[in-house]
Amino acid sequence: MRESCEKIRCRGLYDLFTIIPFQADPRRVYAAVDTLVMPSRWEAWGLVAVEALCSGTPLVASSYLGQRESRANTPAVMVPPENPQALAEAMSAATDTRRDKSARYQAFTAEECARFDSRKSTNRLLEFMHTVIDNPRKASRPKSTAA
């Protein structure tokens, strides 16, 4: 983060950016922004994107592997990675149609939150653990058939 801030400062662009430090409860931040833009080159999982969509915040993001899979069937606008022209066009479109999109994102909020609710993952893990405890042979690895 420090390195990115320094690059921004060296290019004389610092006044164009708002760098927000870690937020234990990011809901206020998402409520304050019109659109979240994630021009990432790579990211294993876009937690910030999930948080944005759960809060009803419109999202423009790079279509790298992890983001492409997790944002399928959502109202997020995906652009090719490292394509500044496509990113600029998507950002402009997000600004031009903010009111129309806002209603679409708000309607999607409950679906996104249910999709990534940590309680679902926790319950699946607990079910698996109970299976292992109740019947350890079922959960064990198959033996190799190699001679």
Image (spheres, grey):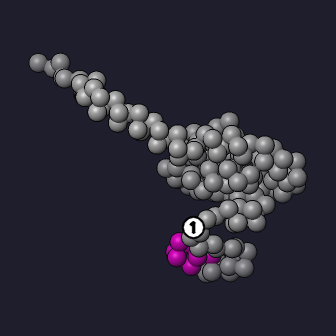
Q: Residue at x 25, y 28 (%)?
A: 136
Dividing the picture into quadrants, the one containing residue 82 is bottom right
Q: Secondary structure at mark 1?
A: loop
Please name whichever residue, 27 or 76, is drawn nearer the observer in this view of the structure: 27
Q: What segment carries the magenta color?
A: 1-8
Please name whichever residue, 120 or 95, is drawn nearer the observer in this view of the structure: 120
> Which amino acid type corresponds to the residue marked 1 in the rendered image?
Ala
The C terminus, quarter of image? top left
Q: Position of residue 103 (x, y in %)?
A: 84, 47
Q: Position of residue 39 (x, y in %)?
A: 63, 57
Q: Is 135 situated left or right of 117 in this image?
A: left
Q: Is 142 situated left or right of 55 in this image?
A: left
Q: Residue at x 69, y 73 (%)?
A: 17
Please name whichever residue, 83 or 59, is drawn nearer the observer in this view of the structure: 59
Pointer 1: what residue? 24
Residue 67, can we see it?
yes
Q: Residue at x 81, y 53 (%)?
A: 94
Q: List the single residue furthest toward the left.
A: 147
Task: Please check the rendered image and state whether residue 115 is part of the magenta-colored stretch, yes or no.
Answer: no
Q: Position of residue 96 (x, y in %)?
A: 88, 55
Q: Residue at x 41, y 39 (%)?
A: 125
In the figure, 107 relative to 147: above or below?
below
Q: Is 123 situated left or right of 117 in this image?
A: left
